[in-house]
Amino acid sequence: MYLWQKRAQYWKNAFIVAPILLGGTASSQILLDGSASWLNYVAAGLALVAGFFPAMFEALGMDMRVREIGGSAVEFTNLRDRFRQLGSRGRHMAIGELSAAFDELMNRMDEARAAAPPVPESFFEEARRKIERGDYEFSIDQQVVGHSPGGGADSSRVESGDGEWRGGVDGPSE
């Protein structure tokens, strides 16, 4: 959704800046000594086009859309991180505690999905390519099993690819 938000912000800025530039260009003919009658037509045309931009901006709901997209992007990112953290910590939780935490996150996910605007297909496909490329793999979560915020001995427990513990006080070291 951040890709879509960036593009929406670009278009929002274009709709704000374009009428200023067009209006400035249209009014510049007053300052110039333009005796050519075609300059009057060009100025009138530019002023007319500049006048359409605010109406188009409002009709497309550009201002609200950028905020709405940004809010949804933040919520989905937070949920992604929470699910990732629950996945790595869940193996150390009691099943009832894990189930309750999972249900709470799923309720938040349902609310986020209901509030999120539908993502255009082109941005969905672009995000899919990024995922397939590995941009959102958190391989460190697969390696570090017991991280403690204080950086104690438990934070150095690392599981190798063959399921053996490497380092830390709870498993054999190499």
Image (cartoon, rainbow, N blue to C red):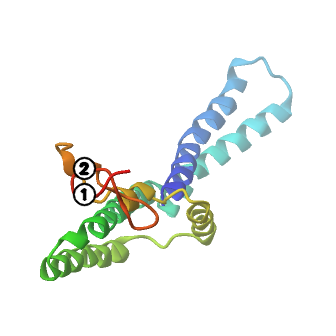
Q: Secondary structure at mark 2?
A: helix
The answer to which of 59 and 148 lies nearer the viewer is: 148
Q: Is residue 162 visible?
A: yes
User: Residue at 33% of width from left, 62% of height from top?
Assistant: 75
Residue 88: x and y, percent? 30, 65
Picture quarter containing residue 97? Answer: bottom left
Please tell me how crowded label 1 is: few (under 14), some (14-19), or many (20+) other residues with Cα within 10 Å.
some
Give residue 146's mark: 1
Give residue 105's mark: none
**Between disc 1 and disc 2, whose residue precedes?**
1
Amino acid type at circle 1 is Gly
The answer to which of 171 and 136 lies nearer the viewer is: 171
- The answer to whether the residue labelled 1 contacts the one labelled 2, judged by CB atoms less than 8 Å apart, is yes
User: Residue at 17% of width from left, 72% of height from top?
Assistant: 93
In three-dimensional space, the C-alpha distance between marks 1 and 2, rounded to whole angstroms, equals: 5 Å
21 lies above or below 122? above
* 21 sits to left or right of 135: right
86 lies above or below 47? below
Residue at the disc numbered 2: 155
Please tell me how crowded label 2 is: few (under 14), some (14-19), or many (20+) other residues with Cα within 10 Å.
some
User: Residue at 25% of width from left, 49% of height from top?
Assistant: 155
Q: Secondary structure at mark 1?
A: loop
